[in-house]
């Protein structure tokens, strides 16, 4: 993931970092020299990740709660120092046909995937604005840019994430704060393993057939890994991306084109 410690001396908070893409991002930022606050609603998962990387601390963070977000930012800064980087990675999904979709499913996806990005960003902003510097990266999705049958509610929440990202980039740019997002495709995570089973059941095929279909839709011919996403997040947080803001970077192996 590069040669030099380009983030040495910086402090990062990563949400949903107990597994999957968030775990890979925590690793990538640590390898780049950052001190990382590994946060997750599952504290034990966060502690496992923090124990595996250097200069890290583990925090409980429920991204749907303003109080939890404020406590996590305060604790991260008290333990590691002023926050330079925020990665809003926490995300959830469910899968259903629109006619069977419940308001509870809709709210669950929006509370974490859209409201959560806003809530944690707002908690981190006072310090970043005061220091007139900061980097925020949100994990959106390929589903925030294209039609995704059976995931209309999830897609809508990720479109919201992208909309928030680009609007925040314009509003916060004068304070020296950059705001970008990454849009992963078919990533090998525990969340996707669940989605394979859900989609297979709804379509009447096997999970293996669903996975093979994903690969056929990916021009680079393989499933995406969490590390594929983490490398791009690391770059967006680095000085090499100092003039990049308001970007929604596709990390999909080309599957967003199909």
Image: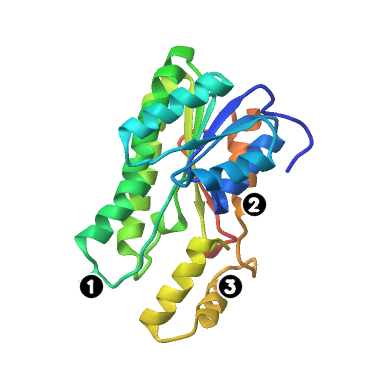
- Tell me which residue sits at (44%, 18%) in the image: 127
Residue 34 position (above or below residue 224):
above
| Distance of label 2 from label 3 (alpha carbons) | 17 Å
Is label 1 in contact with label 3 (beta carbons under 8 Å)?
no
> Which residue position holds label 1?
100
Residue 188: image quadrant is bottom right
Label 2 SS: helix
> Which residue position holds label 3?
215
Residue 136 position (above or below residue 198):
above
Is residue 44 visible in the rendered image? The answer is yes
- Tell me which residue sits at (39%, 45%) in the image: 162
Q: Which residue lies furthest to the right in this view?
A: 3
How crowded pointer 1 is (Cα within 10 Å; few <14, some 14-19, many 20+) is rated as few
Camera-side residue of 124 and 150? 124
Is label 2 in contact with label 3 (beta carbons under 8 Å)?
no
How crowded pointer 2 is (Cα within 10 Å; few <14, some 14-19, many 20+) is rated as many
Camera-side residue of 59 and 180? 59
Q: Which residue lies furthest to the bottom in this view?
A: 204
Identify the mark nearer the N-term, 1 or 2: 1
Camera-side residue of 54 and 135? 54
Label 1 SS: helix
Which of the labelled discs sits on residue 227, or is there none? 2
Residue 235 position (above or below residue 223):
above
Q: Where is residue 43 in the image (x, y as percent from the top left)?
A: 49, 43
Identify the mark nearer the N-term, 2 or 3: 3
Left or right position of 30 against 170: right
């Amino acid at each position: 993931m590069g040669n030099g410690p380009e983030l040495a001396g910086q402090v990062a908070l990563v949400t949903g970092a107990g597994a999957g893409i968030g775990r890979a991002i925590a690793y990538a930022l640590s390898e780049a020299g950052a001190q990382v606050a590994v946060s997750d609603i599952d504290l034990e998962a966060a502690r496992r990740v923090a124990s595996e990387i250097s200069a890290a601390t583990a925090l409980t963070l429920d991204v749907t709660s303003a109080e939890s977000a404020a406590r996590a930012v305060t604790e991260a800064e008290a333990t590691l120092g002023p926050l330079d980087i925020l990665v809003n990675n926490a995300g959830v999904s469910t899968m259903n046909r629109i006619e069977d979709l419940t308001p509870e499913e809709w709210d669950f996806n929006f509370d974490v995937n859209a409201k959560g990005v806003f809530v944690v960003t707002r908690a981190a902003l006072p310090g970043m604005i005061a220091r007139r510097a900061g980097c925020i990266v949100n994990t959106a999705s390929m589903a925030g840019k294209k039609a995704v049958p059976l995931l209309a509610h999830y897609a809508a929440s990720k479109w919201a994430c992208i909309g928030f990202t680009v609007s925040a980039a314009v509003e916060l740019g004068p304070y020296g704060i950059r705001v970008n997002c990454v849009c992963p495709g078919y990533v090998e995570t525990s969340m996707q393993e669940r989605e394979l089973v859900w989609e297979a059941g709804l379509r009447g095929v096997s999970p293996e057939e669903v996975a093979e279909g994903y690969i056929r839709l990916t021009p680079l011919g393989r499933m995406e890994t969490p590390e594929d996403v983490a490398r791009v997040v690391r770059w967006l947080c680095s000085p090499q991306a100092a003039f990049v803001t308001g970007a929604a970077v596709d990390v999909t192996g080309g599957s967003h084109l199909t």
